[in-house]
Amino acid sequence: MRVGIGHDLHRLRPGGPLRIGGIDIPHDREAIGHSDGDSLLHAVIDALLGAAALGDVGQMFPDTDPANRGRDSTEMLAAALEAVAALGWKIVNIDCIIFVQRPKLLTHRLSIRQRLADILGIDLERVGLQAKTGEGIGSIGLEKAVAAQCVVLLGERDEG
Ligand code: MG
């Protein structure tokens, strides 16, 4: 088995929607990023690549490459998963935390988990998701940033 950890943060600006986990959530702020600014998917990508010692999202998708501008992070995650699977690994489970002051994510939690499960090709019960505010202080609490963390456990794929 292998365990990996991922972390990502994006600055926020007035606008919307807010993309989290491949879902566009109606909001009055949006993430600034070279790609689509999806911090949750970027954290999942880094956790996957980290578990397989394949580097990180910046290495696989450099922000110096114009092809990655505005790129859909679900595509990047699919490519990372493919690289990990090619080494003989499959996902046992993932657990993630989103750090954002607003909006309340409770009503979006199931759809974000389902989207992650669909992209990763795993059962919903293997995808954990928690949401935290910034308690009104710091970059998260003052709504200047959104961040995410993820841990992933990989196991050996059954052959045949
Ligand atoms: Mg990022």
Image (spheres, helix red, strand yellow):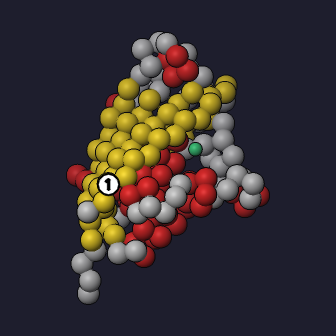
Q: Identify the image quadrant of residue 159.
A: bottom left
In the depicted structure, whether residue 102 falls above or below residue 150? above
**Closest to the observer, 1 or 160:** 1
Q: Quadrant of residue 90?
A: bottom left
Task: Identify the residue at the far bottom of this view.
Answer: 160
| Label 1 sits on residue | 3
Position of the N terminus by quadrant: bottom left
User: Would you place residue 109 above or below residue 53 in this image?
Assistant: above
The answer to whether residue 42 of the structure is visible from this angle is yes
Q: Is residue 67 left or right of residue 121?
A: right
User: Which of 144 and 156 lies nearest the eye of the viewer?
Assistant: 156
What residue sits 75% from the left and 54% below the top?
A: 64
Q: Position of residue 73 (x, y in %)?
A: 56, 54
Looking at the image, which is closer to me, 108 or 48? 48
Label 1 neighbour load within 10 Å: few <14, some 14-19, many 20+: some
Residue at x 27% of width, y 71% of height: 156
The image quadrant in which ligand 1 is located: top right
Left of 92 or right of it: where is 38?
right
Residue positioned 30% across, 60% down in the render: 2
